[in-house]
Amino acid sequence: MRETLAEWRPAIDEAIADLVPREIDADYLASFFGDPTYEYDPDAIQRALSTPLWDLLDRGGKRWRAVLFLVFVEGFGEDPAAYVDYACIPEILHNGTIIVDDVEDEATIRRGERALHRVYGRDIALNVGNAMYFLPLKILAENPADLPAERRLAAYEMLVAELNRTHLGQGMDIRWHNEDDVGVTTDEYLEMCACKTGCLARIVARLAAIITDRPDDVEAAVARYAELTAVAFQIGDDILDIEHSLGRAGDFGKEFGNDIREGKQTLLVIHAIQESDPERARRLQDILAAASNTDAEIAEALAIIEDAGSLEYARERALELAARAREEVDRLEFDAETTRKLHEFTEFVIEREE
């Protein structure tokens, strides 16, 4: 899967640059947004939109959502090169959500550098993040693959539905790490993941199915695959945060003890609270609820999570979800190479090192 990611990334970044150039000028603004009523300020838009957007994109990121979209398109019998512009839709949406997410979480680090709002200010970061919800819709409007009107409408309706549900997941996540003793259950956590992370992955799969005119049952099956894989990815992300903090993972690009400092109710935390003795469970809850934590408190919370066997438990749940995702793929009539890539992808999202 890493080879597939590396192969497609340059083309994806080039397509994103066609949508939002690295250098903004008046001609681009007029062609993309329409003629100004009075006069645009290209320099202001450069500094407040393009520069921060490309700052984040240039830091890395696997572009796996865009690449997974192209794998689906090829599996559906179409030339993926003809749909690279559409692959930008989930990729830009994803990066927009993490900019806003970092502001909401008051995060300090993103992809190994200061979070965008720490560099450019909260106002610019929020504006860029919100703009990235809307910029990719221009791709559907410009219709580079000459799709019929009914497919474009179906894509718009799907995007609206999934993006709304994404914000349900974010709402649950914010509520949980801003309040004490919320008593999150495993199923509630998994539903939050299915909304917050899963919906963006569902966009990948459903968009590929819609623009290539697949039947409803195929669209539903690839959406289930994508959602299950994304929830496994989120659990893997939670595991990486803990392993990085324990010194067992590479450069994760986030602050030491990031999830604990933010008071996140992850699957590992939920399991540790359930499996620890009452005193240690209460101590973990107190550390999570604190406005700030010392490194010693972070280490204490990590020890509680590790002693409860929560890392092993979370990894088993992620592997179980990945296996269920592969079952969805096996029900479809993809060629052997596409099936291999989709199977491999469910392993990549769990076993990745950063």
Image (spheres, rainbow, N blue to C red):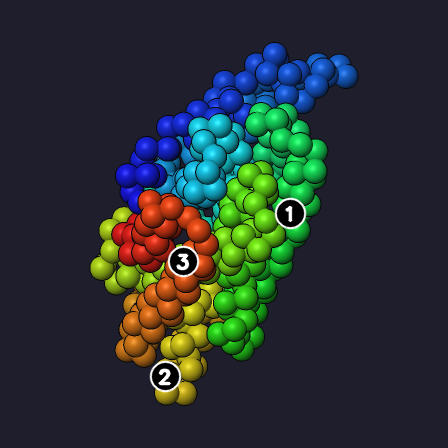
Give how far across and how far down residue 155 sits, in percent.
Answer: 64, 41
Verify CB contact (< 8 Å) between mark 1 and mark 3: no
Residue placed most toward the observer, 76 or 80: 76
Q: Residue furthest toward the top?
A: 27
Q: For residue 20, which numbered disc appears in the image?
A: none
Give how far across and how far down residue 326 sits, in percent.
Answer: 39, 59
Above or below 129: residue 315: below
Give how far across and how far down residue 139 sits, in percent.
Answer: 60, 30
Residue 283 left/right relative to 247: right
User: Quick one: label 1, few (<14), some, or many (20+) residues within 10 Å?
Assistant: some
Q: CA distance from mark 1 to mark 2?
A: 42 Å
Q: For residue 158, which numbered disc appears in the image?
A: 1
Badge 2 amino acid: Ser
Give how far across and how far down residue 100 sits, in percent.
Answer: 55, 46
Among the two numbered marks 1 and 3 on one chain, the one whose residue lies closer to the N terminus: 1
Among the two numbered marks 1 and 2 on one chain, the one whose residue lies closer to the N terminus: 1
Badge 1 amino acid: Met
User: Quick one: label 3, few (<14), some, or many (20+) residues within 10 Å?
Assistant: few
Above or below 3: residue 33: above
Which residue has dot 2 on it? 276
Above or below 40: residue 311: below
Q: CA distance from mark 3 to mark 2?
A: 39 Å
Residue 164 can be seen in this image: yes
Q: Mark 1 or 2, which is nearer the eye?
A: 1
**Residue at 52% across / 73% down in the picture?**
187
**Residue at 58% across / 34% down in the picture?**
136
Which residue has dot 3 on it? 330
Q: Quadrant of residue 75?
A: top left
User: Quick one: label 2, few (<14), some, or many (20+) residues within 10 Å?
Assistant: some
- At mark 1, the secondary structure is helix
Among the two numbered marks 3 and 2 on one chain, the one whose residue lies closer to the N terminus: 2
